[in-house]
Amino acid sequence: MGGSTGAAGSGGRGSVPPVVLGRRALNRATLDRQLLLRRATGLSVEDAVGHLVGLQAQNVKPPYYALAARLAEFDPAELSGLLADRRLVRTVTMRSTIHLHTAEDALPVRQLMQNALERELTAFRSGLVGVDLVELAGIAREAVEAAPRTMKQLREVLLVRWPDADPQSLGIAARCVLPLVQVTPRGLWRRSGQVALTTAERWLGVPGPAQDPSLVDAMVVRYLAAFGPASVKDMQAWARLTRLREVFERLRPGLRTFHDENGVELFDLPDAPRPDPDTPAPPRFLPEYDNLLLSHADRARVVPAAYKGRTWKGNYPYCVFLYDGYLAGLWRLVEDAASGAAVLTVEPFEPVEKLGRAGRDALTAEAERMLTRIAETSTSYDIRFGTVYGTVIGTAAKTGAKAGAESGGGSGTG
């Protein structure tokens, strides 16, 4: 921990003025917690996923991209093997989206999010008239534990009992009331597979967890370790949980407090790293909807105001890259299995000339490093600066091709 930002904090509401953490200080602290300031060495995939309290996995590729950016020795086959061995699972948790969790975390995290998931059903009430959710949970559990089923197959089972209900609403009700997981081969390295579901208890061979009142306290600590320093609203945005103020107040004596530049109170673990704001932050290529971009109410620590809303179009999310620690543009990898060629296109939000030669070289080196891990089928690749999604953003400039490199990784199917 270096610099003045980590030198002092307040454990309570005394007369001592609070230490203010500027935007850059928050950026560097968060990158450090997210393993993005420097890649972690000697950290297993399983431990990394646990430290990060899961990885966004709405599609198959994002966890592979996310860990390639965070782990020095990342091998995609390790992640795939952990999924096959049921030590990692894909399941609905935070923000009602699919996340990759350790087997140890899957059920407790799901239990913590359960009330938020059930609140989601209020929007589907009209399609569930006459449906008893307890009975629905029993029928759905029996069906998916007999054999993994696609959502279409599960809806068909439920429609036998409630033929007048809305099929989509029945499916959403099942995913909200039951801890369903996506079974393999979905999510495996370079394997295709439709989404088939069973319960976490059946897939992992464990009973459901008992109600644990201390679970939320433990999760606050883990959230701060992975995303802090953070406000109460930040954690509520991450988990869509409510009434967390009383939990933070209960934990206050064991935490440090700061303020951001807007006067918002931030909480943190006493010994958590808060690097000097001038610590260099190398470029990083991240997947769509990376946890870094979604886990704070105030995202200014990573997303410049000018770039808000530029990481997606409609329902289509973009892969993004960081430059000097902040969101700075988009990227896209296109692979041709037949020819063995891969093209990674980098599209800065600002004119590429502003990066200078050193900036372009740093981005190219990071892109090349990532390609050697996730472009497994490629015998050659190009790294280009240009337009990636058919919309011109900034001024494009083309770099020279990087060809003939041996590749050692790959991405899953979408």
Image: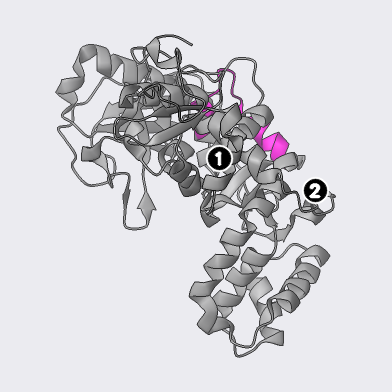
For badge 2, the amino acid type reads Leu
Q: Secondary structure at mark 1?
A: helix
Does 279 sit above or below residue 76?
above
Q: Is residue 386 left or right of residue 54?
A: left
Look at the image and say whether residue 79 sits in the magenta stretch.
yes
Residue in the image at 57% along x and 79% along y: 167
On the question of residue 272 being in view, the answer is yes
Measured from the top left, where is residue 59 in percent x and y?
52, 49
Badge 1 crowding class, 10 Å Cα cut-off, few under 14, some 14 to 19, many 20 or more, is: few
Q: Position of residue 395 (x, y in %)?
A: 14, 32
- What kind of element bears circle 2? helix
- In primary-sequence order, the first of circles 1 and 2 is 2
Q: Residue at x 80, y 54 (%)?
A: 208
Residue 92, placed above or below residue 167: above
Q: Which residue is mark 2?
A: 204
- Closer to the camera in the image, 100 or 305: 305
Place residue 356 in its image quadrant.
top left
Q: Quadrant of residue 89?
A: top right
Looking at the image, can residue 302 be seen? Answer: no
For the residues marked 1 and 2, what is the alpha-carbon distance in whole angstroms? Answer: 35 Å
Residue 184 in magenta stretch: no
| Residue 161 numbered tag | none
In the image shown, does 314 or 381 lie closer to the viewer?
Answer: 314
Please identify the dominant SS of the magenta region.
helix
Q: In the drawing, does residue 59 fall left or right of residue 158?
A: left
Looking at the picture, the colour scheme in use is one colour
Q: Which tag is nearer the camera, tag 1 or tag 2?
A: 1
Identify which residue is drawn at 70% across, 58% down: 179
**Mark 1 — residue?**
249
Which span is picked out in magenta? 66-83
**Residue lying farthest to the top in this orientation:** 2
